[in-house]
Amino acid sequence: MGPAQAAEPAVDRAAINAVFAAIGEQSPGCALGVYRAGEILCAKGYGLADLNHGVPIRSDIVFDIGSTSKQFTAAAVLVLVQDGKLGLDARSAAAPTRTGQGRARPLHGAADAAAQRRPE
């Protein structure tokens, strides 16, 4: 390492554990991953993934997030609207359909169109 390059800071596991100390072994928890340059520096689970069955969160657990990512996408779109970088009346370039044929439509109508396509 040359003099112009500073050493990367180490992961302070004690500080990380202190942040999550309030999460008990029998409470809902979270998974933590710290990565640098594609390398896992720290991976740990805290608390339970399933309260009914007492399944602990491990560093290798896979969470089934279902449709929760849609809420984050909607929030991100609204931030872009708020910042003036996107308009709800703007037409999408090619919103995919089940047949693969894209058609432009306003963003504010996309949720209504998706709800109409949803099977009963």
Image (cartoon, helix red, strand yellow):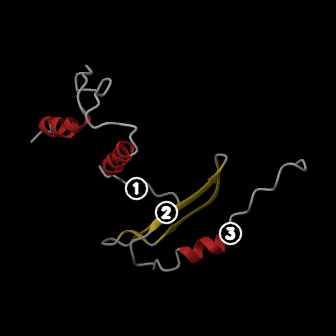
User: Which residue is labeled 3 in the image?
Assistant: 12
Q: Secondary structure at mark 2?
A: strand
Q: Is residue 75 left or right of residue 16?
A: left
Residue 63 location in percent, x, y? 40, 56
Q: Is residue 20 left or right of residue 114?
A: right
**Residue beneath the point at 24% across and 22% down:** 103
The answer, for residue 58, to whether it is visible in the render is no
The answer, for residue 19, to whether it is visible in the render is yes
User: Which residue is labeled 1 in the image?
Assistant: 63
Q: Secondary structure at mark 1?
A: loop
Whole-number angstrom distance, CA of label 3 to CA of label 1: 26 Å
User: Which residue is labeled 2 in the image?
Assistant: 31
Please determine whether, in this image, residue 27 is positioned above or below residue 45: below
Q: In the rendered structure, which amino acid carries the disc numbered 2?
A: Ala
User: Which label lies toward us, 2 or 3?
Assistant: 3
Q: Nearer the viewer, residue 45 or 3?
A: 3
Residue 70 location in percent, x, y? 31, 47
Labels 1 and 2 touching (C-beta < 8 A): yes
